[in-house]
Amino acid sequence: MGQLTGKVALVTGASTGIGRATAERFIAEGAHVYLTGRRKLELEAAAESLGDRAVAIQNDISDLDDLDRLFGRIADDGNRLDILFANAGGGEAEQPLDSLTPEAFDHTFGINVRGTVFTVQKALPLLNEGGSIVLTGSSSASRGIAGFGVYSATKAAIRQLSRVWAAELAPRGLRVNTLVPGPTDTPGLRGLAGPGQVGALLDDMARSTPLGRTADPAEIANAVLFLASDQSSFITGSELFADGGEVQVFQ
């Protein structure tokens, strides 16, 4: 029997990277998993590869009507949720203060903060007592990285929201924690590199960790599983750093 046998989970931003790896890990542990993402073809390919306990629902967390459709579909299937991994997010490559535009600011906060807030809010009626909510933070929220002010601010907001929600939702038996990945070799990270610069980017990211490498998405998924499962039953309002020591050692 797996750690999540009989559980129902929702993983947002599950088309690729950490979200997809986490959906795969949850399914391996016995869960039935709803996967969401904006890119239909990648999302459906991910679900197909994961088997009959994976259900793909195209969704944009910045669109509140889309969120209503998502949770309506889960309810129509006769399911409730035991786990919510609110992983969807993003941002521009670099947004220095002197060139930041209102449009870029609104886009990043709209996905990472507004989208996460209303994903969790709209999931509440479906979450079972004793359920686990895991948010995706970022090691950038604990560091001063030039050009990443807006992105890191959104992830600092996520950190604080998880603390407040942990207090608010404790009477329902719901736990809320933040998973903080360090540099992870995902398509999203590779997309930050210029033409022909992927190797250089990954090498630079690897040097930012004491372990001297980037993470595989499966390693981050293992940490999410811990927070989602009963193994962390007395943990709430916390941050779990799966960052290769980037913040705790080098910061």
Image (cartoon, rainbow, N blue to C red):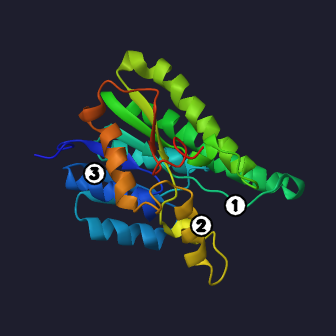
Name the image quarter holding residue 23. Answer: bottom left
At label 1, which amino acid type do we have? Glu
Residue 105 x %, y %: 77, 50
Relative to 227, 37 lies left or right:
right
Relative to 142, 171 lies left or right:
left
Q: Mark 1 points at which residue?
A: 92
Residue 44 x %, y %: 39, 69
Q: Name the residue under label 2.
A: 204
Relative to 40, 99 lies left or right:
right
At label 3, which amino acid type do we have? Phe
Q: Residue furthest top?
A: 171
Q: Which residue is drawn at 55% across and 66% down?
A: 188
Residue at mark 2 to residue at mark 3: CA–CA distance: 31 Å
First in residue order: circle 1 vs circle 2: 1
Taking depth in this image into account, of 142 and 38 the one nearest to the observer is 142
Name the image quarter holding residue 157. Answer: top right
Residue 243 to residue 94: above or below: above
**Quadrant assignment for the C terminus:** top right
Q: Is mark 2 on a helix, strand or loop?
A: helix
Q: Is mark 3 on a helix, strand or loop?
A: helix
User: Closer to the camera: disc 1 or disc 2?
Assistant: 2
Q: Residue at x 54, y 44 (%)?
A: 137
Q: Which residue is drawn at 36% across and 34% down?
A: 132
Dot 3 alpha-carbon crowd within 10 angstroms: few under 14, some 14 to 19, many 20 or more = many
Taking depth in this image into account, of 44 and 78 the one nearest to the observer is 44
Name the image quarter holding residue 48. Answer: bottom left
Residue 58 x %, y %: 47, 60
Residue at mark 1 to residue at mark 2: CA–CA distance: 19 Å
Residue 57 seen: no
